[in-house]
Image: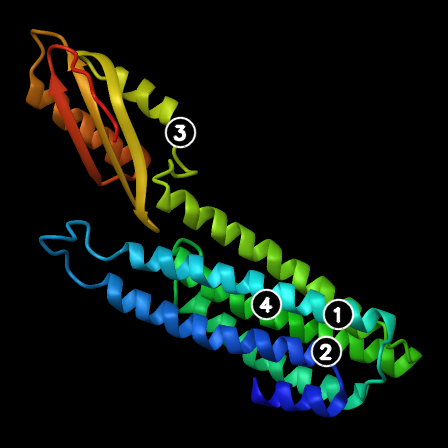
């Protein structure tokens, strides 16, 4: 980060300066993600019965917002340079960007091989920060090559804008996922209609209502519902069949199912 910042000032490269700013946010994002993992591991308490897992989602949302801010800064700076692109020391710029690329690739490797960047939204948001840095370094190298070969100094702000747009795309995917969790939305991997149909297929079940499916944190989905059963059906047998079905077919291990013989009105507050 420091190398790219001072190198950007020395070479007059916006691509390097913007990438160093992105790295600064990454340092904070990675620290926040680490704190979130530690905080989420704390046991549940009497007042936090689900534990502190949601802290990971809050950290991911904050990281996504910082990505939006950084991309906006890069685009604003690039806009001014489009009208008067300054001369850039492209050779030195490429060397510094190459060192930054190696550092980012090492970080990305650690998060994918050692961490869980696929299913954990918190680690994924940190990974996207690092990946955005790597793209910034690649963009800086490409811009430096164009300026070195053709003296086309417009390449510096142009590459910066392209990288900023890629950062925005990644930030939006993380933000959308985090907001869906915070709004108690249904996980994208689960179809509520299919869940209801499967439960209705259990012998003795007449109706399924008050069905709620939500995510506590990455990889931890929950379900609650009411099952209206026949008068002669064994409630414990139906309940066990329903719990096993939900866990086996939808990988939801935290389910709360109420079995009843007369339909009750359920309200969501």
Q: Which residue is mark 3?
A: 191
Q: CA distance from mark 3 to mark 2?
A: 46 Å
Q: Which residue is mark 4?
A: 70
Q: Position of residue 23 (x, y in %)?
A: 55, 77
In primary-sequence order, the first of circles 3 and 2 is 2
Q: CA distance from mark 1 to mark 2?
A: 7 Å
Q: CA distance from mark 4 to mark 1?
A: 12 Å
In which quadrant of the rendered image does the C terminus lie? top left
**Residue placed at 43% from the left, 57% from the top?**
61
Q: Which residue is mark 2?
A: 14
Residues 240 and 101: in front is: 101
Q: Nearer the viewer, mark 4 or mark 3?
A: 4
> Is residue 200 found left or right of 175 in the rendered image?
left
**Residue placed at 18% from the left, 19% from the top?**
227
Q: Position of residue 197 (x, y in %)?
A: 33, 18
> Is residue 259 found left or right of 127 in the rendered image?
left
Q: Are marks 1 and 2 in contact (CB under 8 Å)?
A: yes
Q: Are marks 4 and 1 in contact (CB under 8 Å)?
A: no
In primary-sequence order, the first of circles 4 and 3 is 4
In primary-sequence order, the first of circles 4 and 1 is 4
Q: Position of residue 27 (x, y in %)?
A: 46, 77
Q: Secondary structure at mark 2?
A: helix
For residue 78, the mark is: 1
């Amino acid at each position: 980060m420091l190398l790219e910042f001072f190198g950007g000032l020395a070479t007059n490269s916006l691509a390097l300066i913007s990438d160093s700013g992105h790295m600064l946010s990454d340092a904070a994002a990675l620290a926040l993600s680490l704190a979130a993992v530690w905080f989420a591991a704390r046991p549940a308490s009497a007042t936090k019965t689900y534990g502190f897992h949601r802290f990971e989602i809050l950290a991911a949302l904050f990281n996504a917002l910082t990505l939006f801010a950084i991309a906006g800064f890069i685009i604003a700076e690039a806009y001014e340079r489009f009208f008067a692109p300054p001369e850039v020391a492209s050779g030195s710029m490429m060397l510094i960007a190459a060192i930054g690329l190696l550092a980012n690739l090492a970080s990305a490797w650690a998060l994918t091989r050692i961490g869980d960047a696929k299913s954990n939204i918190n680690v994924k948001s940190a990974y996207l920060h690092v990946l955005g840095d790597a793209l910034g370094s690649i963009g800086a190298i490409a811009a430096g090559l164009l300026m070195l070969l053709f003296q086309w100094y417009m390449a510096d702000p142009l590459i910066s804008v392209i990288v900023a747009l890629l950062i925005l795309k990644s930030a939006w995917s993380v933000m959308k996922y985090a907001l869906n969790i915070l709004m108690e939305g249904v996980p994208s991997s689960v179809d509520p209609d299919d869940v209801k149909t499967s439960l209705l297929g259990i012998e003795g079940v007449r109706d399924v209502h008050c069905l709620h499916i939500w995510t506590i944190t990455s990889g931890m989905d929950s379900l609650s519902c009411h099952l209206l059963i026949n008068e002669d059906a064994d409630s414990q047998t139906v309940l066990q069949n329903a719990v096993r079905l939900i866990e086996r077919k939808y990988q939801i291990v935290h389910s709360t199912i109420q079995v009843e013989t007369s339909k009750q009105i359920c309200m969501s507050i």
